Amino acid sequence: MTDDSKQNYLKGGGYRFLVLFFNCMLTFGSYYCFDMPSVLQDEFQGVGNCTQNSTGLENDTCVKCDDCLGMSAADYNLLYAIYAWTNAAVVIGAGFLIDKLGNRVGVFLFSFLCVVGSSLFAVGSMLKGTSAMLPVMLLGRLLFGSGNGSLTIVQNRITAYWFRDKELAMAFGITLAFSRLGSVLNFFLTQSFSETYGLSWTLWAGTMLCVLGFISALIVSFLDMYGVRQLGDEQNLKAESKKLKVTDIKYFSLSYWLLALAIMFFYNGVFPFVADARQFIHVKYKFDKKTSSYLAGAVYDVSMVVSPFLGGLIDIIGRRGILAIMCASLSIPVFGILAFTSVYPLVATLWLGLTYSFAAASLWPSIPLVVSPATVGTAMGLTTSIQMIGIGISNLVVGQILGKTLDLEPEETLLRWKYVMIFLLANSLACVVTTVFLNINDNRRGGILNLSRKQKAIKAAQLAADPAEEKEPDERDPLIPNQRRPNIN
């Protein structure tokens, strides 16, 4: 195969979609592992906890339970808290590290951390009844959180490189769908697996899925390295990385910061809701816990199915900024329905799943459009950190609103759940306001977020016809700088 034919093959759809497949597999196993404690909550802290993790003594007041870990509610929630705050602290540095050292170092390091973290978590479960159990499991979640959040950043960076100016939103949608597939399969399979093989073997099975992600990391690293070299971009990327400095964050445009805030406010409504949706539906609508879980999980079910198709549609029509306003606005009635009506909750969870899918397919793929290729990892890391900080604060607020609902009258409990829905609605309102300002700013700067595929082609033809407008790109330039944006009506 000649050099020209190799480049034509690499630029064609086959190779980049091969990269995309193994790139998607990076986080399939880690997303499966992340939500395993929520499915196995009874085994971690529920009925039949017969060991005390602080003293190692058996509790004589409960029925013998071989697989129970004896965690308190505070210990159980700490497993999630340490993951969120670790993500918020690590991903900024991880994003800069990826931009500085490249995709291949990042994908190997962070997938390896996922394997080590999930392994320690499984080992900790085998130490039940000892004082070492909780520290080992927390250390595992800390390492797992350091790897998984950062792995998503390098995954997005690889996607942004191979699908820039092509099927970018669709590619982001497919990666989201694969991640959510891991979450959904965990929801449907983990409980049955645990009942058959026990808790420890279930956690080790999750570790094996992380090993599958590590193998995918090795493959995608090779594909990315080979493709970049054949396209002749390796030296350019290395040169840009050498010039990159942490202080380049100050060059991020207002559009980027508004995007980051919009993502934070939108996810402040979705993730805290999903975390507590099962209990809310159980309390308000009187469904059993299994049915409540299925209804709450519909948010991710919808996202898994429709995200790739929405991504493909957005690649064609553009209008990312307008869609961001729409999905934020249409999320408001969801929390209104849940707070003030008795409409069947599946209506609200399916509705929220659709708006969440539109938000993920329009907001995240917009980041590579407003920052330079050399800073995509840093931008993604900073956005993830802002998002995690917001989610962490929202979870704390929700916890304070609910308080100890077991000690309250049913009417007071429902009133507090109504206040929670109003708080989540307020985050959606804040997202609407932010996305309105985002569109105003983007329109003043050329409207890049709302360009369709046809309009991008027209712009590219105009640049090709007038090369005098081109300038040597700088590492701080966005993908389509202001001075190269003609007005397109």
Image (cartoon, helix red, strand yellow):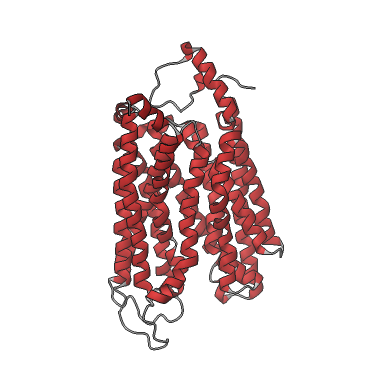
In this view, the residue in front, 46 or 54, is 46
How many numbered marks have been drawn onto this rendered protein structure? Answer: 0
In this view, the residue in front, 311 or 349, is 311
Question: In the rendered image of this protein, does residue 248 appear above or below residue 59?
Answer: above
The residue shown at (45%, 15%) is 470
Query: Splitting the image into 4 quarters, where does residue 434 fall?
Result: top right
In this view, the residue in front, 218 or 424, is 218
Question: In the rendered image of this protein, does residue 234 appear above or below residue 365?
Answer: above
x and y, in percent, of residue 386 in the image: 46, 46
x and y, in percent, of residue 364 in the image: 50, 41
Question: In the rendered image of this protein, does residue 38 appear above or below residue 112?
Answer: below
Task: Determine if residue 135 is in view.
Answer: no
Q: Quadrant of the N terminus?
A: top left
The residue shown at (33%, 47%) is 217
x and y, in percent, of residue 272 in the image: 53, 58
Task: Determine if residue 19 is in view.
Answer: yes
Q: Is residue 342 left or right of residue 353?
A: right
Q: Residue furthest front?
A: 1
Q: Is residue 424 left or right of residue 44?
A: right
Q: Quadrant of the C terminus?
A: top right
The residue shown at (43%, 76%) is 195
x and y, in percent, of residue 322 in the image: 63, 37
The residue shown at (45%, 57%) is 182
